[in-house]
C-alpha cells in the first residue's frame, strides 16, 4: 500500500526533476542563430542576386571597402557559398525522400570527380602562385560548387546535362580548348606538366557529359588565367 508520506515524497521528487528534464530537452534543440553575414537576407533572396551583385551589396552595407581590408569581400563570398551549399543540400534531401536521387555508384563517381577537381585546384594554385586565403581562391571554390548542384539537378530535370551541345556551344568548346592551352602555357615548366596531368584526371575520374566537359574547361580557364585578363566566360552565378 502506498502511504501518504511516500506519495508526498514522489510528488516533491517529480517537481524537482521536471525542470531538469525540460532543460535537457531544450538544450537538445538549440535555436539556430541567423548568420549575421547574410545581412538579414534569406538564402533564396541572396541567391537571386549574382555573386558579384551580392558582393557589391555586402560591401556597400557593411562599409568594408578599404583596400587593405579585403575581409569584406571574402566574408561576402563565404556567405554566398554557404547559401549555395544549403540549396544543393535541400535538393539532395528532396531527391532522397522521393527515391529519385543518385545511387551509390553514381555518388561514388561524383566523389572521385570532386577529388580530381580538388587536386587540380591544389596544383593550379601552386603553379599560379595563388594563396589559399586569397580572393581568387575564394572565387574558385565558389565557382566549383556548381558541379555538385548540377550533379543533383541532373536527377531532378530530365536531360539537364545529357542534352547535346548547341552549335554555339560546340564553337565555344573549340575556343575553350584553345584558350585553355594558352593559359596552361603561361605556367612555369616545373608546374605545367603536373597541372595538365591533374586536369586530364578530372575527365578520367568519372564519366562526364559534353556539357559538363565544357563547364570544366570554362572552370579551368578561370582558375589558371591571370586576374588582369578579360574573363573567358561569365561566372555561372
Image: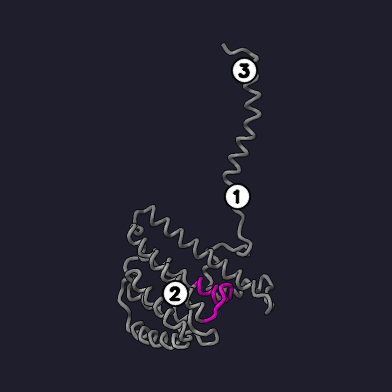
**Residue sitting at 50 percent across and 65 percent down?**
84
Mark 3 closeness class: few <14, some 14–19, many ≥20 residues within 10 Å: few
Q: Secondary structure at mark 1?
A: loop
What type of secondary structure mainly makes up the magenta span? helix
Q: What residue is disc 2 on?
A: 120
For the image shown, how many numbered marks are present on the structure? 3
Q: Residue at x 49, y 84 (%)?
A: 225
Dot in front, 1 or 2: 2
The picture places residue 151, in percent across and down from the top left corner, at 39, 66
Q: Is residue 129 magenta?
A: yes
For residue 99, which quarter of the picture? Answer: bottom left
- 178 lies above or below 98: below
Q: Earlier in the sequence, mark 3 or mark 2?
A: 3
Residue 31's label in the rendered image is 1
The vertical placement of 152 against 17, above or below, is below
Q: Which residue is mark 3?
A: 7
| Residue 88 in picture, x, y percent from top left | 45, 62
Instruction: Say which residue appears at 35% left-offset and 64% top-offset.
Output: 109
Residue 40 on the magenta span:
no
Whichever of callouts 1 and 2 sits on the residue coming sooner in the sequence is 1
The stretch in magenta equals 128-142
Query: Is any atom of residue 215 visible in this view?
Result: no
For marks 1 and 3 on the same chain, the one whose residue lies earlier in the sequence: 3
Image coordinates for residue 33, horizontal then vertical, percent: 62, 55
Q: CA distance from mark 3 to mark 2?
A: 71 Å
Query: Front-most of 42 and 102?
Result: 102
Q: Nearer the viewer, residue 32 or 147?
A: 147
Amino acid at each position: 500500500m502506498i502511504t501518504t508520506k511516500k506519495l508526498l515524497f514522489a510528488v516533491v521528487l517529480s517537481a524537482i526533476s521536471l525542470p531538469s528534464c525540460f532543460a535537457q530537452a531544450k538544450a537538445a534543440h538549440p535555436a539556430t542563430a541567423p548568420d549575421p553575414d547574410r545581412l538579414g537576407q534569406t538564402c533564396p533572396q541572396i541567391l537571386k542576386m549574382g555573386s558579384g551583385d551580392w558582393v557589391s551589396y555586402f560591401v556597400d552595407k557593411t562599409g568594408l571597402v578599404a583596400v587593405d581590408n579585403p575581409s569584406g569581400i571574402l566574408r561576402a563570398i563565404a556567405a554566398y557559398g554557404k547559401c549555395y551549399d544549403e540549396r544543393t543540400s535541400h535538393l539532395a534531401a528532396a531527391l532522397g525522400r522521393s527515391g529519385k536521387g543518385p545511387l551509390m555508384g553514381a555518388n561514388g563517381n561524383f566523389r572521385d570527380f570532386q577529388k580530381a577537381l580538388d587536386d587540380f585546384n591544389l596544383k593550379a594554385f601552386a603553379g599560379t602562385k595563388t594563396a589559399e586565403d586569397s580572393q581568387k581562391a575564394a572565387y574558385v571554390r565558389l565557382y566549383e560548387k556548381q558541379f555538385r548542384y548540377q550533379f543533383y539537378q541532373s536527377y531532378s530535370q530530365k536531360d539537364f546535362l545529357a542534352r547535346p551541345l548547341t552549335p554555339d556551344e560546340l564553337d565555344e568548346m573549340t575556343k575553350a580548348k584553345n584558350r585553355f592551352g594558352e593559359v596552361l602555357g603561361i605556367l612555369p615548366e616545373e608546374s605545367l606538366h603536373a597541372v595538365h596531368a591533374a586536369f586530364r584526371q578530372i575527365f578520367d575520374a568519372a564519366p562526364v557529359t559534353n556539357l559538363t566537359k565544357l563547364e570544366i574547361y570554362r572552370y579551368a580557364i578561370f582558375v589558371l588565367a591571370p586576374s588582369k585578363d578579360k574573363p573567358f566566360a561569365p561566372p555561372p552565378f
